[in-house]
Image: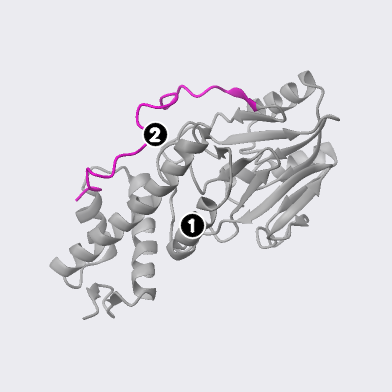
Amino acid sequence: MTVPESLSDPRTSKGPELGELAIVQDVEAGLIRLLAPNASAMTLDGTNSYLIYGTDGSAILLDPGPDSPTHLARISEVARERGLAIRAICLTHHHQDHSEAAFTLASTLGVEVFAHPESFDKLSFRRLKLSGRISISGISLEVIPTPGHCGDHLSFLLASGVLLTGDHVLGRGTSVVAYPDGNLGQYLDSLNRVSEVDFTRLAPGHGPVMDKGLGEEVISYYVAHRKARLDQLVEAILLNPQVTGEELVEIVYGHQLSEKIRWAALASTMAALRYLQDSGVVNQGEDGGFELIR
């Protein structure tokens, strides 16, 4: 099975192709995107870090990304060239491709890390309040909880209207909602929440920045894509009672998956199955197989 052909990705043939994303981009006055050199099947072009800055030169570094000397040197160089001083580090979520360099860099710069209250257990950081507008080093951000990709995921709306979405909405591909860290019910709720935000652009954690029109189309596509996957799973379980999660991956995604992508497909499938269980649609037997609740 594949996603129905009627679900066409609105980003097709728009923007730079995979591997051609600019390393440094001035998104608008006060916002610079910097691409980390950690491209992979899971991170796509690599992780986008962002320098958010005010007229006085104070800057927030959002998602410093991997602990890559090349990437961190580039961030430092761009900040120096633009006359910016990084006063704080802020995170959309705890995943390593976004946060690995955060605490080492914060120590080097003598600044604090701001994150979701539940992002880290044993590290010292500033816990963000989970709604409303805040000011960090004189820069205004609206915190928007967007759990689903993981429980501590946050998006940030700038005063200009740019919405920094981390891994919630991507510039290409779809976000992995991987059980048990990911929760599909929360993810769908978060997509609905973001669809109601009056943004001007979406600045994602991976892939190209999108304008308002394309961003709105992508959010609608994401919802339709998830619902199509759920329908596929229900159909597969109807035709194959007591089917396992691993067997469903073969049925829905096919056999041509690398080991790493297969793990992501299985974790996403299990998150969808948990959503169907919580919705009273399917049940998991003692042997691990799934069946429809009639």
CA neighbours of label 2 inside 10 A, class few (<14), some (14 to 19), many (20+): some
Q: Give residue 287's quadrant in the image.
A: bottom left
Q: Which residues fall within the magenta stretch?
A: 1-27
Q: Residue 268: where, in percent of width, then height?
A: 38, 56
Q: Is residue 13 left or right of residue 64?
A: left
Instruction: Residue type at mark 1: give it.
Output: Asn
Instruction: Residue type at mark 2: give it.
Output: Arg
Q: Which residue shows up at 80% across the image and 46% down it? A: 136
Q: Give the labeled residue for mark 1.
A: 192
Q: Residue 289: where, in percent of width, then height?
A: 25, 72
Residue 182 visible in the displayed image: no
The mark found on residue 11 in the picture is: 2
Give the CA separation, mark 1 to mark 2.
20 Å
Q: Main secondary structure of the magenta part?
A: loop
Q: Which residue shows up at 50% across the image and 31% down it? A: 208
Q: Nearer the viewer, residue 16 or 177?
A: 16
CA neighbours of label 1 inside 10 A, class few (<14), some (14 to 19), many (20+): some
